[in-house]
Amino acid sequence: MFRAYPTSPVCGIVPAMSESSFPAKLVDKFGRHVDYIRLSVTDRCDFRCVYCMTEDMSFVPRREILSLEELYQIAAAFTELGVKKIRLTGGEPLVRTDVMTLIQNLGALPGLRELLLTTNGSQLTTYAEPLKRAGVNRINISIDSLQADRFQRISRVGRLDKVLAGIDAVVAQGFDRIRLNSVVMMGYNEDEVLALTDYALDRNVDIAFIEEMPLGEASDHAREDTTCSNAWVRAQIERKYQLVDSPTRTAGPSRYSQVAGYRSRIGFISPVTHNFCEDCNRVRITVEGRLLLCLGNEHSVDLRAILRDGSKDKGDLKRALVASMEIKPERHHFYDRDHAQPVRLMNMTGG
Ligand code: SAM
Ligand code: SF4
């Protein structure tokens, strides 16, 4: 188990607030309620996807990376402030040594309703069963092509057969929901939209098509040339299937449709062509302990500095989380020349 968090005097991050006077919810200055965190457990990965990483990546030095215990402390503080849903991401979360210990501890957090994971699927034949046992409810698996050579071109090093076997392994475990994530890019995989849809429908799993976001500079292509709008992706699917929009709305940038007669939902995550920031309910924590208030802006709080300052305690951490709501930006500004674009790549962001 993790050691107890040390207790010590209050610091001056925000006006003094006793534990009992913490708000039950995290609410930003636009009235949005943050009840969902995406926790990056590593910036490392066994793939090098062209839209996510440059060919020649350098990673955060190990001493700057949060320990599993520190990640747990952050997650626990958030749940005490009303967060109900945690998604583990990265980098590739399943390459972090001993990540199952963290997942088991998170699965037992009081107040948490959903523990989710986003993975590239390469390790799922090993981890599907332990993940289910540890209380993970839903899994998202990224897959951009069903052709082995093309899959390798996009991931630079990944093996399609391992990912397909991983998908079969999680389907066999019967998670609440399984969703495939596909980034559709002109010149890479735009002609596979229907094949990927058929694959998901055949397995009763969901699939979400994601617009490539301008997070950092891609080294193999100019993003403005490859980014495919979801309106275009949807039109490809409608050449074969009739899509019915789902009445249930989720917070954030995804919108779901269904194909009559199938259980699978087809999601469209359209952060580039649509701005759904008014519904935003989430924040991200990078593996360096940077609390990122918005995917497309640099507003952040250094949680690692608080965790590693022996004079600060859990109350200080929670005060910093409450105070951070004041700087959550109203919206992102992808491709808006009047606004600075993020230089952070997705593996450093916690996708
Ligand atoms: N390694 C895991 C995976 O690939 O699922 C988790 C981390 S990955 C950064 C999370 C998600 O971000 C993946 O579905 C990936 O396709 C997506 N992603 C990465 N870079 C992106 C970008 N520039 N634009 C849109 N989606 C991106
Ligand atoms: Fe790794 Fe996921 Fe990024 Fe691909 S998208 S390089 S699998 S972190």
Image (cartoon, grey):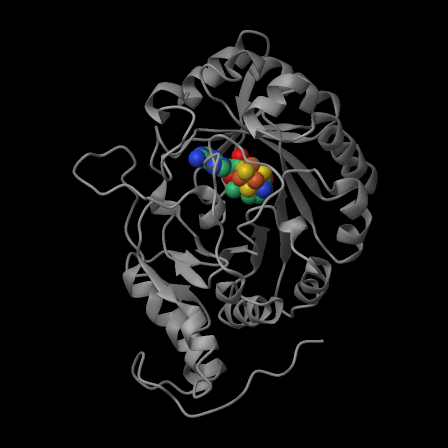
Determine the residue located farthest toward the bottom in the rendered image.
9
Q: Is residue 51 left or right of residue 104?
A: left
- Left-right relation of 320 to 89: left
Q: Quadrant of the N terminus?
A: bottom right
- The picture places residue 314, in percent across and down from the top left corner, at 49, 81
Please tell me whether residue 68 is drawn above or below residue 319 in the rendered image: above
| Rendered position, 170 above or below 330 | above
The quadrant in which residue 292 appears is bottom left
Residue drawn at x 64%, y 14% as measured from the top left: 195
Residue 338 seen in the figure: yes
Does 244 sit left or right of 226 as displayed?
right
Quarter of the view holding residue 98: bottom right
Count the marks: how many?
A: 0
Which residue is at the front of the view, 276 or 222? 222
Q: Quadrant of ligand 2?
A: top right
User: In the rendered view, does 289 fall on the left or right side of 98?
Assistant: left
Direction left: furthest residue? 338
Residue lying furthest top: 239
Q: Is residue 260 visible?
A: no
Question: Is residue 239 or residue 40 the one in the foreground?
Answer: 40
Which residue: 74% across, 33% down?
Answer: 167
The residue lying toward the viewer, choosing from 349 and 238, is 349
Height in image: 10 above or below 59?
A: below
Residue 141 in the image, given as x and y percentages of width and height: 64, 37
Q: Residue at x 78, y 36 (%)?
A: 171
Q: Where residue 6 sits: x, y (%)?
A: 54, 87
Q: Where residue 337 sits in the image (x, y, percent)?
A: 19, 34
